[in-house]
Image (cartoon, rainbow, N blue to C red):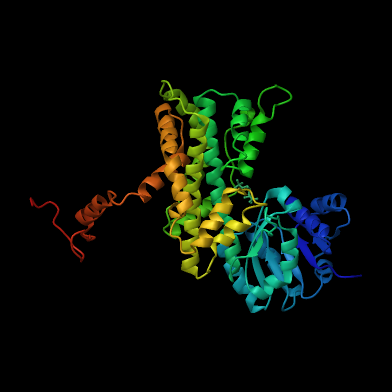
Amino acid sequence: MTQADIGVLGLGVMGRNLALNIADRRFSVVGYERDPALLTQAMATAEGLIVHGELERFVASIKRPRALLLMITAGPPVDQSIKALLPLLSPGDVLVDAGNSDYQDTGRREALLRQARIGYLGLGVSGGEEGARHGPALMAGGASAAYARVAPVLTAIAARADDGASCAARLGNAAAVGHFVKMMHNGIEYADMQLIAEIHDLLSRGYQLPAREISDVFAGWTNGPLASFLIEATATVLRRTDTETGMPLVDLVLDTAGQKGTGRLASIAALEFAVAAPSIAEAVAARVVSSLKDQRAAASVRFSRPVGDLPLLDQQQLADALLAGKICAYAQGFAVLSVASQAHGWELALDQVARIWRAGCIIRARFLDDVAAAFGSTPALTNLIMAPEFASTLERTVPALRAVVTACVASGIPAPALSASLAYFDGYVSARLPANLIQAQRDCFGSHGYQRIDRPGTFHSDWSAAE
Ligand code: 6PG
């Protein structure tokens, strides 16, 4: 029997679809699934795919040096699979973790497998089920020799941007890079979704527009600077009617947001690297607050929302506010990537990251062409806000963001991500901040010392002295 070019371990929704995508690109692929129910399902739905329920047979059926894609739940299952696979693998084989693993686990696993001379790649996969089947964005990290073994497959199955470029790339030498970049993708995804949800809330609870009309507003933005998958998806879901009740389906969906944790990890990473990413953090917090449904219901009886007329805002102002909020959120996400890359010596090319996010992934957007161009022309760009094109856009759109946040604040409509983006912008463009007072307080109660603006050195004062 001829041996397969690649094996996919784990045939849940993502694994099955990735395997089918690989087969479509004329690579021979073999699958493995431990769970009998998923194995049966894969056999029934994945026509033409050879699947095994026995690990030894699966590994033996892959061409040497073997390439195996792990498409399993992040966390302990990855360690368990590696442990089971190790005795069956040979030096030179390559394992690719294509799940949403914590990047620190990926670094640890790479070091472990290096001892056995097994190549290890961390692969961020974005695009959900549809992407896995027809073209995801693939963010790889790891040694070039290991990547070379799987590059033809990954390049072929990935989405293509409008210019025809494959949205698969090796972004750095360390396996952890792939999962770090995917984690930040998800942090940005959280912020983007929350910003959209806040504009929706203002239109829905604030201006009392029905879902269908709000859908039309978002649909009107699918061709401008906001053109993106998430805007399209928003217009789509807002249009859907529940067949039983005739109501907009979205209005019947329980308002508690789930999360698998990558947004939270992105936010934790930002804090660890001391990078301000408040729009991402607020998006995570908003999901947490949303999950307190019973507490919110009880509190809503105790406190009422302010009443009064909302200022008239036109659709262009809402679009501009969203765009400004989005630029600030992306600026934060890229700042985290930049600082983490410097700290770890990853030499991450931020323009390349933006380029492979242009298609296939959840945050795919026209906007990312401009982000790629900004980092491409100035690789050492300190903040996306300062790229000439984004600076001009912000100059034009921040007044609308201010107006929208003001309207939300006045009417008691929570807009944590929009507000955080605005505060981030206002802070970043302030030459002087009240941190002088923070420093004085720190020195007053803890003798932490402070610096002065008028002379060099570190100072300490007795703040309670009369003069
Ligand atoms: C992607 C997504 C995906 C993520 C889901 C759900 O890029 O395809 O980011 O990886 O798992 O979007 O994430 P949450 O459950 O955390 O919202």
Q: Is residue 277 left or right of residue 291?
A: left
- The answer to whether 256 is drawn above or below residue 208 in the figure is below
Residue ID at (61%, 54%): 357
Residue ID at (67%, 50%): 127
The residue closer to the viewer here, 174 or 359, is 359
Residue ID at (51%, 39%): 322
* Identity of the residue furthest to the right in this view: 1
The residue closer to the viewer here, 95 or 360, is 360
Q: Is residue 78 left or right of residue 314?
A: right
Q: Is residue 307 left or right of residue 3?
A: left
Horizontal and vertical percent position of residue 215: 62, 31
Horizontal and vertical percent position of residue 222: 62, 39
Horizontal and vertical percent position of residue 185: 57, 53
The residue closer to the viewer here, 191 or 43, is 191
Residue ID at (67%, 75%): 145
- The answer to whether 166 is drawn above or below residue 215 in the figure is below
